[in-house]
Amino acid sequence: MQDMVEPLREVRDGYFISLNIGTPSQVIQVYLDTGSDLTWVPCGNLTFDCMDCDDYRNNKLYTAFSPSYSSSALRDTCSSRFCINVHNSDNPYDTCIMAGCSLSTILKGKCTWPCPSFAYTYGAGGIVAGTLTRDTIRVHGANPNVIREIPNFAFGCVGSTYHEPIGLAGFGGGSLSLPSQLGFLQKGFSHCFLAFKYANNPNISSPLVIGDAAIAPRGDLQFTPMLKCPIYPNYYYTGLEGITVGNAGVTTVPTNLREFDSQGNGGLLIDSGTTYTHLPEPFYSQLLSIIESTISYPRAKEVEARSGFDLCYKVPCPNNTNPMNDDLPPITFHFLNNVSLVLPHGNSFYAMGAPINSSVVKCLLFQSMDDGDGPAGVFGSFQQQNVEVVYDLEKGRVGFQPMDCALSASSKGLLHKG
């Protein structure tokens, strides 16, 4: 399988990949999600129903797939490994019994009933329900002008959801995921997320590189081991050892951010589908206290109350000049294997609006992790901006390297002249 370079479009709370599905091709915009396996799209413009969602139909980014308009679309069968996987069944006969086949037909290998409808749940409480469908998808080669057709790609054709208005491209490590189906799970992929200021800018895309080129040695890439979670083996975890604020000493993190407990809970999940980094209590509150002690700017408590962020400051910017100039402390993440990543400027504190009266309000875009089972913390997409993140699946490690992602996009032909 040749390498791929796909453009990612930045939106307010994540990064979109365009899926070209069907015959003729329908272009559906979905979020890139390294924290799940299933790729799914909203199906049926008029019949798709999203419960407890904002008015997503008025969202210009919303697109739905119509299988009836594609001559190559078909329902997956109950005996396919993808059907068994989406139903989380360890029993290969289970899905065909659910579909209505007799055991004798199944044992003779003659059951061709469709895969039963499924429900797929997400850690943040979202649910999608639909049918497993197969169709042709088209992807870019290493050269953006080269298009390749991949027949029989399996994805969820979703008719109803809760809290999930827009589809997802699953980039986890399971058999249903997009890199797995395209044959890249023995290699890897990398992304370089553009800074927030490029959100909704149609003239430039973040590069997503899949294949050998993604994991080739280069530059100052530092690798930390990928931790294998016993309960969620398909997701990408790493271990966090400490966080440094400014010139202060390293603040040691709790053990559960470095390793899993006997139930498989813990670790730091790297998740492009979560916008902000989440850290567990009481460590999160301790970190806030350390950050607070290093900053002398006045707090903007009214913005904290309105935005839900925990630390907001009024930062002076004389003559309403460049709000990037400030004395807010840099924040460094220390991962296992002596890997340190200084978060690029703008990845921790972000200007909540334009400067007014020679000052701008900046908030810390970290949040506390809800208690419960699963990861102890999440490294979100906002903190991954202007960082090349490399998922080296061949060697089981994750690489980080600060980078000007706009420059990287330009070098890969992803700067579109308007």
Image (tube, rainbow, N blue to C red):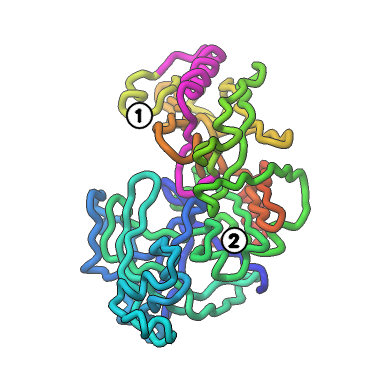
- Among the 4 quarters of the image, the one containing residue 281: top left
**Which kind of residue does numbered mark 1 sit on?**
Gly
Q: Relative to residue 219, is residue 50 depicted above or below?
A: below
Question: What whole-number distance in Å separates the C-alpha atoms at marks 2 and 1?
Answer: 35 Å
Q: Relative to residue 199, is residue 47 depicted above or below?
A: below
> Does the segment drawn in magenta span residue 275?
yes
Q: Relative to residue 407, is residue 256 depicted above or below?
A: above
Nearer the N terminus, badge 2 or badge 1? 1
Q: What residue is disc 1 on?
A: 308
> Does the segment drawn in magenta span residue 171?
no
Q: Is residue 47 left or right of residue 17?
A: left
Camera-side residue: 367 or 371?
371
Magenta segment boundaries in residue numbering: 270-299
Residue drawn at point x = 51 percent, y = 44 percent? 381
Neighbour tally class for label 1: few under 14, some 14-19, many 20 plus, Cα within 10 Å: few
Residue drawn at point x = 31 percent, y = 27 percent? 306
